[in-house]
Amino acid sequence: MNNFPNPHGSPPPHPPYGYGGPPPGDGKATAAMVCGIVSVSLVFFYGAGLIPGIIGLVLAGMAKKEGFVGGKLTAGLVLSIIGLSLSALIFMACMTCIGFMIFDEMTRTGW
């Protein structure tokens, strides 16, 4: 063996096991963030962000359980909660309007 570097450019040695890859839960945290963004967007454009909000909360919980800590996890959790609460407020407002319409119809007809 000689001490001279390989002139053909051999690749560097592989890092030890566990280094170089994404941390556990990173993909789920990213998916939770995307679901949170979709949930808030659907609330503002269509008034319904319930399903992506629930999925975002579940994914954020799974990522936290795997030990992921970071901004993506926090953003996914917060945006999912905002989307769910705004969806719940819109749902309650719609049910209140329907109730008032039924009450008004009942009082007009003398039912």
Image (cartoon, helix red, strand yellow):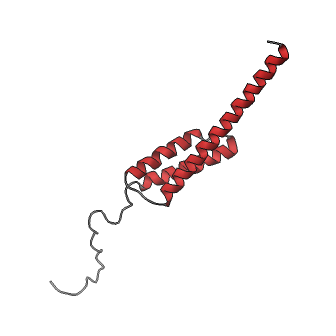
Q: Nearer the viewer, residue 78 or 110?
A: 110
* Residue drawn at 46 percent across, 49 percent down: 60
Q: Is residue 102 left or right of residue 18?
A: right
* Residue drawn at 52 percent across, 52 percent down: 76
Q: Is residue 96 left or right of residue 2?
A: right
Residue 80, relative to residue 17: is it above or below? above
Q: Residue furthest right?
A: 108
Q: Nearer the viewer, residue 26 or 87?
A: 87
Residue 63, relative to residue 87: is it above or below? below
Q: Nearer the viewer, residue 105 or 27?
A: 105
Instruction: Point out residue 5 in the picture as x, y percentages from the top left corner.
Output: 25, 84
Instruction: Point out residue 43 in the picture as x, y percentages from the top left corner.
Output: 65, 44
Instruction: Point out residue 42 in the picture as x, y percentages from the top left corner.
Output: 64, 44
Q: Is residue 6 left or right of residue 44?
A: left
Residue 24, relative to residue 83: is it above or below? below
Instruction: Point out residue 44 in the picture as x, y percentages from the top left corner.
Output: 68, 46
The quadrant of the rendering that contains the N terminus is: bottom left
- The quadrant holding residue 97 is top right
